[in-house]
Image: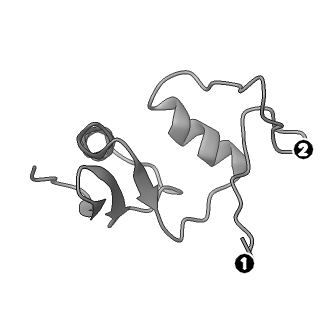
């Protein structure tokens, strides 16, 4: 698949890709969002490295994929019920 506004680097065959060439803290046009969405459909899991987003920017980006889901069995970030922290410490 050729993407017009982003770079896509597959990670592991049919599952997962890293997305580059985009700064999620900036206002993105519809064509860029379309490319990101298509990469998600193509690879099922997508990653963005080295992004500096506020909580509000993070939630706004997520809403481009649909309504945010609050997980009933996972504790959210303190004071932010729409954000989950996924962390792996150095020794894990």
Which residue ends up furthest to the bottom in the rendered image? 90
Question: In front: 66, or 31?
Answer: 66
**Crowding at mark 2 (Cα within 10 Å: few <14, some 14-19, many 20+):** few
- On the image, the x and y values in percent for residue 41 come to 28, 36
Instruction: Choose the circle earlier in sequence order: 2 or 1.
Output: 2
Question: In front: 84, or 73?
Answer: 73
**Crowding at mark 1 (Cα within 10 Å: few <14, some 14-19, many 20+):** few
Quadrant in the rendering for residue 29: top left
Quadrant in the rendering for residue 78: top right
In this rendering, the count of numbered labels is: 2
At horizontal 73% and vertical 50% (from top left) the residue drawn is: 85
- On the image, the x and y values in percent for residue 57 come to 61, 47
Question: In front: 40, or 21?
Answer: 40
At horizontal 72% and vertical 43% (from top left) the residue drawn is: 84
Q: Tell me if 79 is positioned left or right of 20 in this view.
A: right
Mark nearer the viewer, 2 or 1: 1
For residue 55, above or below residue 81: below
Which residue bears the numbered disc 1? 90
Q: Tell me if 69 is positioned left or right of 23 in this view.
A: right
- On the image, the x and y values in percent for residue 15 come to 31, 50
For residue 64, above or below residue 13: above
- Element under label 1? loop
Q: Tell me if 63 is positioned left or right of 74 in this view.
A: left
Which residue bears the numbered disc 2? 78
- Element under label 2? loop
């Amino acid at each position: 698949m050729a993407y017009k506004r982003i770079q896509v680097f597959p990670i592991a065959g049919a599952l997962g890709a890293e997305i580059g060439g985009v700064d999620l803290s900036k206002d993105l046009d519809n064509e860029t969002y379309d490319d990101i969405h298509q990469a998600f459909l193509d690879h099922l899991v997508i990653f963005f490295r080295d992004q500096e987003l506020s909580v509000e920017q993070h939630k706004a980006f997520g809403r481009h994929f649909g309504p945010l889901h609050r997980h009933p069995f996972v504790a959210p970030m303190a004071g932010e019920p729409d954000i989950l922290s996924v962390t792996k410490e150095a020794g894990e």
